[in-house]
Image (cartoon, rainbow, N blue to C red):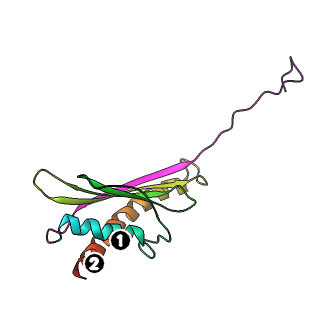
């Protein structure tokens, strides 16, 4: 309440703290699997991700097939997302990249838990890329 004007209440600023974690991994694609085939495999995984990397549901937010190809999958109710990107360099080597964003409003910045999550999510991104490449190789044989 404002002392000069008792009928006016002074609003206190709300403090919101939310920790977001970002991690990424990029690897060359197997040279024996064409980029178009990899893209088909990724789209199939995106449309039916059950059991893939712990995802139980996915919404395709965007797709772009005019060069660099990507899709975004979001986990329900968390705001967390993963982008899958296929690209090529000037030498014609094809790459897959995974970029992750995890949203954790319950974690306070600078805490021990926060520091632990930074390390943990980097490991998750690297492991997810390894699993993605294994899945691509396995599905390409089918």
Confirm whether the magenta stretch covers residue 30: yes
Where residue 93 appears, x then y in whole percent?
14, 58
Q: Quadrant of residue 13?
A: top right
> Is residue 119 among the parts visible in the rendering?
no
Task: Please tell me whether mark 2 sits on a helix, a strand or a loop.
Answer: helix
For label 2, the crowd category at 10 Å Cα-Cα, with few meaning under 14, some 14 to 19 and many 20 or more, is: few
Q: Classify 127 as above or below 22.
A: below
For label 1, the crowd category at 10 Å Cα-Cα, with few meaning under 14, some 14 to 19 and many 20 or more, is: few
The mark tally for this picture is: 2
Q: Which residues are magenta?
A: 5-32
Q: Residue furthest right?
A: 6
Q: Are marks 1 and 2 in contact (CB under 8 Å)?
A: yes
Q: Quadrant of residue 65?
A: bottom left
Residue that carries the numbered disc 1 in the rendered image? 44
> Is residue 79 among the parts visible in the rendering?
yes
Q: Quadrant of the C terminus?
A: bottom left
Image check: 58 left or right of 131? Answer: right
Q: CA distance from mark 1 to mark 2?
A: 10 Å
Q: Quadrant of the N terminus?
A: top right
Residue that carries the numbered disc 2 in the rendered image? 139
Image check: 106 left or right of 48? Answer: right
Q: Residue placed at 27% from the left, 79% from the top?
A: 138
Where residue 49 appears, x then y in whole percent?
42, 72
Task: Please tell me whether mark 1 sits on a helix, a strand or a loop.
Answer: helix
């Amino acid at each position: 309440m404002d002392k000069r004007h008792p009928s006016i209440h002074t609003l206190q600023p709300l403090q919101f703290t939310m920790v977001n974690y970002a991690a990424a991994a990029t690897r060359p694609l197997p040279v024996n699997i064409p980029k178009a085939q990899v893209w088909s495999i990724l789209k199939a995984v995106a449309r039916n991700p059950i059991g893939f990397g712990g995802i139980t549901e996915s919404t395709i937010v965007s797709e772009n097939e005019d060069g660099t190809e990507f899709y975004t999958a979001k986990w329900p109710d968390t705001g967390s997302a993963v982008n899958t990107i296929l690209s090529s360099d000037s030498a014609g080597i094809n790459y897959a990249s995974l970029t992750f964003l995890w949203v954790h409003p319950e974690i306070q910045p600078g805490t021990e838990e926060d520091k632990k999550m930074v390390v943990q999510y980097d490991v998750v991104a690297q492991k997810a890329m390894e699993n993605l490449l294994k899945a691509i190789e396995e599905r390409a044989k089918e």
